[in-house]
Image: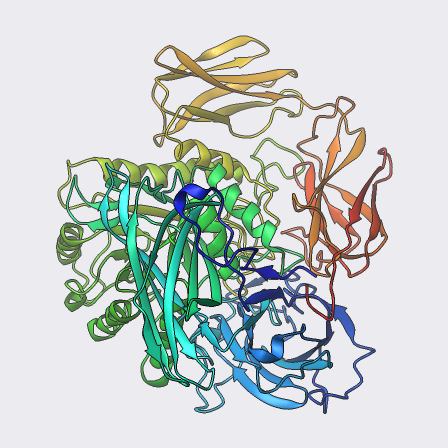
Amino acid sequence: MCAILVGASVNRLQAADTGTYAPPVSPRATYNFNPGWKFIRQDVTNAEQAGFDDSKWADVSAPHTFNDVDSYTAIISHSGGDRHPYAGIAWYRKHFKLPAGAKDGKVFLEFEGLKQAGRFWVNGKYVGKYENGVTPFGLDLTTFVNFDGADNVIAVKVDNSNDYKEEATGTDFEWMGRAFNPNYGGLNHDIWLHLTGKVYQTLPLYENLQTTGTYIYPSNFSISNSTCDVTVESQVRNESGDQQSIMLSVAVVLDGYVCATFKSDVSDLVSGESEIFTASGPLTKAQFWSVEHPALYDVYSVLSVNDKVVDVQKIRAGFRKAEFRGGVGTGGVHLNDQFVWLTGYAQRSSDDWAGLGEAYPDWMHNYNAQLIRETHANYLRWMHISPQAVDVRACDQAGIVEVCPAGDKEKDVTGRQWEQRKEVMRDSMIYFHNDPSILFWEAGNNSITAAHLQEMVDLRKQWDPNGGRVVGCRTLNDPASTPIAEYYGVMIGQDRRTDELTNNYELFRAYSKERRDRAPLVETEDFRDEAARRFWDDSSPPHFGFKKGPNDTYNWNSESFCIAAAGRYNDYFMNRISNTDPNHSKWAAYASIYWADSNADGRQDSSEVARVSGKVDSVRLPKQAFYVYRVMQSETPDIHIIGHWSYPSNTVKNVYVAANHCEAVELFVNGKSEGKVTTPTNGYIYVFPNVVFRPGEISAVGYHNGATCNDVIQTAGEPKSLKLTAFSDPKGFKADGSDVTYFDVEVVDAAGRRCPTDEARVDFKVDGPAIWRGGYNSGKVNSINNLWLDTECGINRVAIRSTLTPGKITLSASRAGLEPANIEVVAQPVVIKDGLE
C-alpha cells in the first residue's frame, strides 16, 4: 500500500538553512483509489445494494473506459456512417477498508472526471450524483463509510447515453455532441481517496463539495533580481465540534530544499464554518516557470491549532509573471518580461489513443507532452471542453502553455445551457488555478454575445483574480465584445475574411487592427486539412499517391501535406515579425489542428476511421509533418529530408528538404552533390527537382554561419524480419490493472533498417497476465483490438494493459516469409491493501 503522506518525521517547519525539508506529520493522507473495480457494461437491477453479488463481473482498474473496444472501427463522414460505440448504462463496484484512525477525521473521494453522468452509493446508501462529464468533482463519504476495519462497497452507475439530459431540468449538455467530445464512457480518469482531520484545508472541488481548496499565486515581481512575493490563500473548514484557534504556515520547497517560509495570523474559527486563511512572504533566488524552464515548487501549507499540527497539504505550483499586450512590435504574450512566440497545436480534450480510448496511464500523458516538446512546440489549445487534469499536470512539467475552454459545441447558448457552461468554467478555474501552464480561459469555441463574455470575465475576476490569466473567445463577431475580451482568438485567421455580421472586409480588417492594438491575437486552429500517415508520396509503393475516394475532402499525401503546412505556418510567422502591413497583427500564438489523429466521430470527410489532421497518428507514431513542424518551430538550425530513400528503379522525383535558420541547403546522393538551394519555398522547403533514385544514401546539409546541420537516409533492402520494441513507464510496468506497455512492430532488412514501403499483415500472440488492446489501421474498418494489424510505412504500434496479476508477459509477432520476433516484459507487483494503493 502506497499512501501519499504529506507528513514525515518532524513536527515543525524547518528553516531555510537546515537542508532538505521534512514536513510535519498530520492526519492527511491520500490513497490511489484506481485499482480493483468490478465492472459490467449493462444496466443491472439492485447493483447499488451493499450485498449484491458482483463476482461474475469483469475486473478493471481506473482509468477505464468501456469504449476502447468499439471506437476507431468504421469510416464515417458528414453524409452518415455506421459507427455505434456503446452508449448507455454501465456499473462499477469496489470493496475497500479504511485504515486505522480514519474514524477521527473526514473521508473524501476525488474523481478527476468521468463520462458522462454518475450516481453513487456507499454501503447501499445514496451519496450523490455528477452530470456535466467535464470537470473533476468530489464526494464526502464521512457519514456513509464503515470504520475499524469493516468492509465498505461503493457502487457507481455511469450513463454515457448520447441523449443524456440533466435530471433536474431535462436540459441536455451542449458539449455532448460526439463530433466535438468523443464519447468514451466510464471511470476514465484517476480517482483519489483523501483522509483528513476534522480541521482541514478543503479540496478544489466545487462540484458537490462546493469547496475551493488552496489558491497560490505570485506578485510583486523583480525578474532581474529573481524575486517575487508568494501568497497562499487556503480555505479551511472546522468540523471539530468546538471553536479552534488556527494558524496557517507555509514552506515553499524546490528539489527538497526550503526556499521560503511564512505564516498567517491566528484566527478563531467556530465549528461548522469555513474561512480563507492567507499567508504571504518573499521568495528570493526564484526560479520562474517558463516554456524553456518549467520550474515547479512544492508548496506545503500547514494548519496548527495551539501549536499542534492538524493538517499538511502539498501542492505543486509554478510562479511566472504573465503579461498580455496589444500593439505591433510590442504586443503578444510576455512571460517574465520576455516576449514568447507561442507555437503548437489544437487537440481534442479527450486526447484519445486508438485501442485505449481516453483511459491510459499518467506516464503516457507525460510522454505525449514530451513528444510535443520534441517539435519545439510550447502551446496547446484544448478544444470545446476543459482538459483532463493529467494533461494539465503534464503541460506544467513540460513547459506547454495551454488554452482551457469550459464546455461548448460551436455556438452561443441561452438559459440553462449557458448556466451549465458557466458552472464548468467556474469549476475549472477553481481546480486549475495553481497550474502555471494555463494562461487562457476560453469562453466559447465560437462567438458569444458581449454580455456573455462579460459574465465569463467576471468569473475570472471572482475565482482567479491573481493567476496571471485572461479570458477570451475563439471567435468574436459582436463589436461590443472588443473592449471586454482580454485576448482575441481566431480560426484560420490569416485568410482574407469578411466580417461575419456585415460581409464587409474593410470592417473585419478594422476589427482586427483595433483588437490587435488592445490585446494579444491568437490563432486557435489553423490548417484543418488531413493526411494519413501511410501515404508517402506519388512515387512510393504500395499506394503511389493518395487516391481520393467518394468521402474525401482533402487531397494530401505526407509529402504534399508538409509542403502545404509550411506555407500556412510561414504566413503567420512572417506576419508576426513584419510591420509592413499595419492592418495585420503581430500574432501572439499559432495552433495547427490537430496534434494527434483523433476519433472525431462524424467530423472527418475522408476514407479514414479517424480525423487525420495530426502531426502524429492516433498511437503517436510520427508523420512526416512531425519533423517538419519540429524544423519550423526550432530556434536553432535544423533540417529534415521529407520522405524516404527506398524507391522502385528508374524513379525520378523532386526531393523536398525542410530547413530553418540556414543560408543554403545542399543535397547529396551517394556523396555526389545534386546542387545547392538558397531560396526556400513556403519559407522552409528547399526543392531539388528531378532527382534520380540511386540506391545507397541521400543526405542534406544546411549551412549557417560556417556551421552545418544535416540529415541522412539510407536505402532499405528487402524485408528480412520483424522487430519488436517495448515502451513502458520508466518506473516499471505495474500490475495495477490499468498500466500499459506499448510495442513498436517494424519490418526490417538484413541490416536492421526499417523497410519504409512495407504494408502487410502481422499476426500477434500474447501470453501471460495481460489484456490485449492492439492498435489500428486508419484506413481499415474494424482493425481495432484484433490480434493482427497491417504495418504502415514499415511500422505500427500495439498495446497491452496489465491485470492485477504480476508476472512475465511474452508478445510474439509473425508474418509468413519473415523471421518472427518475440519480446518479454514483466508486470511488477503492486501492493494493494484493502482496495487502496
Residue drawn at the location 42% of the way across and 44% of the way down:
399
Residue 767 visible in rendering: yes
Quadrant (top left/top right/bottom left/bottom right) for the C terminus: bottom right
Foreground: 305 or 819? Answer: 305
In this view, 339 is above or below 281: above
Foreground: 49 or 742? Answer: 49
Left or right, 471 with respect to 195, comes to left
**Number of dots carrying numbers:** 0
Horizontal and vertical percent position of residue 702: 43, 17
In this view, 214 is above or below 402: below
Quarter of the figure with residue 72:
bottom right
Left or right, 780 with respect to 710, comes to right
Horizontal and vertical percent position of residue 78: 50, 66
Quarter of the figure with residue 488:
bottom left
Horizontal and vertical percent position of residue 80: 55, 69
Colour scheme? rainbow
Residue drawn at the location 67% of the way across and 74% of the way down:
100
In this view, 325 is above or below 37: above
Foreground: 364 or 693? Answer: 364
Horizontal and vertical percent position of residue 185: 60, 72
Name of the residue lying farthest toward the front: 306
Quadrant (top left/top right/bottom left/bottom right) for the N terminus: bottom right
Residue 618 visible in rendering: no
Left or right, 282 with respect to 603, comes to left
Quarter of the figure with residue 607:
bottom right
Foreground: 443 or 16? Answer: 16
